């Protein structure tokens, strides 16, 4: 494992002999190619101790609902058999992060956690570091879900894809490594009963918001992620240069699995790289999304402190143009309920809403169009921002991650440039239905979405 993935949070490197080595699993919810898990296993073997993997299920995680929790729990439950076969104690604990970690750390000789990229979970890791320091327990954080680790990536908020791209491409080859999970020497015989409960019972226990139902389209878990990957390579990669076309449905639909860390981005990169000779341009287009665009979003949330607030999420020129056009007349004004019930005058926007509400996913091009229309149909820009972010984080399975915040900020000029000035949008990029009709068979997309509702 490259040293750039490793961050020591305490000066205590020599552990006291206690009960186990602890891996707090949160970002990387997988066994395959999980450098944090492999590192923890190596430490357990070195200290001749069992390995305990802890996952904390928080009942009140912001914007999480049955759709998100179900997908995540499907993935976690699928890990149980593999952990048991390896002699690893896998514990799912329900409760607040801080309280649960406070109970688990005192018995740990060594603690490993994975890196988070959003403020709430970064703050918990800061608290964990203070706990470990006070108890003189060694704590190491491993960057699991980037291709180029944060230490080697740009250390400032990048302006756009064009500014971060050469910096990532220059170093990426040094980090395309996989890690094997070592055999555990000291087997654990403990068995956690909580994770064995039915998902329905777990959802009831945490009183999960049931207003948004499980997606009928996506099932969580590493095995399902790899099934989607192989299906994408076979069925869609040959046509991936048409992936911007909503009517052709050739996207990978792997973003939910990346969001929950159920598949490694490095594993994806290497698997697609194997197809470079056969599908060169298509592979390049996919890796642009996986490496450049995804890690631009991570750079945004890590290095732009105000990434999640309207007042600080975009650039100065964008705020100036919005201020200049704040009082422009709006022909249509819709509410969130209008959107959720597909009650706008725009059939293509309504179709995109159906895809979101019914499946937890929306084609990337339609996500851009969808957001631009909400800007156009809102009384002011801040209302539009809050509406877009709320819908995004509530209904998309991959909501509430760096790509979510970067994509919503893009609608308001972040990572974009100034365009020709026009009503309402000012110099923000504008999109309309004529563009959809000109570029795509957009009626075919709308018809397919209407069939979902039926």
Image (spheres, helix red, strand yellow):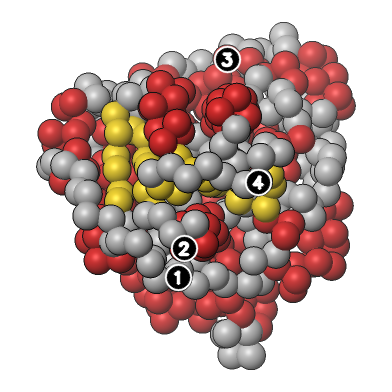
Give the secondary structure at mark 1.
Answer: loop
Residue that mark 4 sits on: 13
Where is 227 relative to 341, above or below? below
Residue occupying the point 60% across, 24% down: 134
* Residue named by callout 1: 182
* Mark 3 vs mark 2, CA separation in Å: 54 Å
Q: Which of marks 3 and 4 is in front?
A: 4
Q: Nearer the viewer, mark 2 or mark 1?
A: 2
The reply to whether discs 2 and 1 touch (Cβ–Cβ < 8 Å) is: yes
Is 421 in front, or is 380? Answer: 380
How far separated are the C-alphas under marks 4 and 2?
A: 16 Å
Nearer the camera: disc 3 or disc 1: 1
Q: Residue 45 carries which label?
A: 2
Marks 2 and 1, how far apart in space? 9 Å
Asked if residue 100 lies left or right of residue 12, the reply is left
Dot 3 or dot 4: first in sequence order is 4
Q: Which of marks 3 and 2 is nearer the N terminus?
A: 2
Name the residue beneath numbered marker 3.
Answer: 383
**Could you tell me if residue 22 is visible in this image?**
no
The answer to which quarter of the image holds residue 372 is: top right
Q: Where is residue 51 in the image (x, y as percent from the top left)?
A: 39, 53
- Count numbered badges in the picture: 4
Instruction: Tell me if residue 150 can be seen.
Output: yes
């Amino acid at each position: 494992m490259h040293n750039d993935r490793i961050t020591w949070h305490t000066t205590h490197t020599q552990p006291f002999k206690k009960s186990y080595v602890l891996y707090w699993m949160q970002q990387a919810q997988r066994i395959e190619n999980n450098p944090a898990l492999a590192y923890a296993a190596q430490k357990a073997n070195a200290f001749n101790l069992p390995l305990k993997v802890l996952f904390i299920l928080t009942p009140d995680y912001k914007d999480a609902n049955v759709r998100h929790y179900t997908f995540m729990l499907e993935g976690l439950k699928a890990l149980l058999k593999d952990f048991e076969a390896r002699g690893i104690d896998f514990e799912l604990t329900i409760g607040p992060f801080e309280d649960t970690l406070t109970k688990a750390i005192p018995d740990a000789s060594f603690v490993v956690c994975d890196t988070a990229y959003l403020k709430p979970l970064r703050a918990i890791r800061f608290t964990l570091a203070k706990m470990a320091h006070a108890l003189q327990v060694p704590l190491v954080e491993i960057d699991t879900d980037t291709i180029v680790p944060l230490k080697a990536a740009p250390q400032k908020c990048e302006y756009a894809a064009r500014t971060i791209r050469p910096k990532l491409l220059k170093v990426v080859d040094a980090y395309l490594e996989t890690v094997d999970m070592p055999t555990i020497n000291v087997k654990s015989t403990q068995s956690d009963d909580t994770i064995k409960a039915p998902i329905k019972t777990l959802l009831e226990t945490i009183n999960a918001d049931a207003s948004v139902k499980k997606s009928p389209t996506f099932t969580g878990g590493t095995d399902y992620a790899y099934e989607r990957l192989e299906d994408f390579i076979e069925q869609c990669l040959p046509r991936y240069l048409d992936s911007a076309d909503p009517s052709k449905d050739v996207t990978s639909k792997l973003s939910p699995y990346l969001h929950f860390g159920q598949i490694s981005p490095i594993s994806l990169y290497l698997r697609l790289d194997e197809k470079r000779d056969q599908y060169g341009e298509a592979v390049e287009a996919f890796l642009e999304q996986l490496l450049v665009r995804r890690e631009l979003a991570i750079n945004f949330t890590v290095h732009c402190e105000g990434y999640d607030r309207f007042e600080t999420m975009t650039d100065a020129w964008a705020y100036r143009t919005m201020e200049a056009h704040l009082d422009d007349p709006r022909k249509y004004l819709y509410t969130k309920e209008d959107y959720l019930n597909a009650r706008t005058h725009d059939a293509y926007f309504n179709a995109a809403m159906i895809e979101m509400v019914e499946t937890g996913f929306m084609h990337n091009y339609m996500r851009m169009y969808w957001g631009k229309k909400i800007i156009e149909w809102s009384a002011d820009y801040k209302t539009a921002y809050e509406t877009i972010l709320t819908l995004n984080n509530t209904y998309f399975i991959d909501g509430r991650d760096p790509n979510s915040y970067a994509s919503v900020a893009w609608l308001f000029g972040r990572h974009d440039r100034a365009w020709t000035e026009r009503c309402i949008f000012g110099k923000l990029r504008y999109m309309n239905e004529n563009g959809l009709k000109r570029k795509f068979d957009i009626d075919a997309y709308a018809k397919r979405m209407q069939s979902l509702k039926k």
